[in-house]
Amino acid sequence: MPRAICSKCNRALKVCLCQWITPIENRVTLGILQHPSEVTQVKGTAKIAELSFQNTAVWVGESLDDLPGLQAWLQEPSPVFLLYPEIDGQAEPCKRFEIDEIIQQFKLKDIKVLVLDGTWRKTHKMMMLNSALRGLNRVVLSPTAPSDYHIRKQKSADSLSTIEAIYELYSQLEGCSQRYQPLLTAFNAMQVQQLRFRQP
């Protein structure tokens, strides 16, 4: 018998996220480029932002050549800032912006942020495949707290999950951590749910 699937979050009903989702009207438009391997990953966190944010778009793939919608999104007049660490030896020129610089130089309603969702190995591959991504302006994120991601292995002690990075970025950009706290509430509830499945 096939598993019952939630029509909204597209997850099996026993791991449905919808009960913890709170709609959030984000001023800065969010784009998520998700690696295909993350789509069915029950421990993935990007779905929380996708369901919560009112102004968001999601694309699944590795190469921009296969994603004309994302290409068009990137070519719109609105400035796009990529949330991704600088790559050593990168040939393409890109400018790094501290969050305070973005706030001072741009109207938040006019900018967009692109986040890559996947393991570090997979997102690095996506960067290597797409020179257009490597050439985007980067936003520099300084987290206010260490990661609380317990159910999935992190690259390093200072790494954040996708939803934690989005929470930190939007709380700092828009100066309103309370507005984005529901992201972490849903994230923590999802972790509790997953940890229950591990109990003997």
Image (spheres, rainbow, N blue to C red):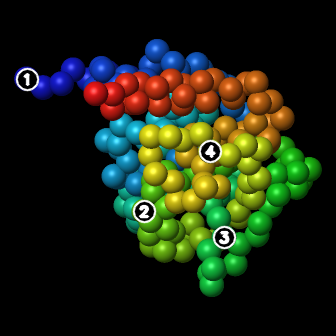
Tag 3 and tag 4, C-beta contact below 8 Å: no
Front: mark 3 or 4: 4
Instruction: Give whichever of discs 2 and 4 has the lower sequence position.
Output: 2
Q: Which of the pair 162/101 is nearer the observer?
A: 162
Provide residue 92's location: percent of width, then percent of height.
64, 80
Q: Quadrant of the C terminus?
A: top left
The residue carrying mark 1 is 1
Instruction: Give whichever of discs 1 and 4 has the lower sequence position.
Output: 1
Label 1 to label 3, Cα distance in Å?
47 Å
Residue 80 in sight in this render: yes
Provide residue 177's location: percent of width, then percent of height.
77, 30
* Identity, as a three-letter code, of the amino acid under mark 3: Glu
Provide residue 67's location: percent of width, then percent of height.
41, 57
Figure quadrant of residue 91: bottom right
The residue carrying mark 4 is 147
Q: Residues within 10 Å of mark 3 (few under 14, many from 20)?
A: some
Label 2 to label 3, Cα distance in Å?
16 Å
Tag 2 and tag 1, C-beta contact below 8 Å: no
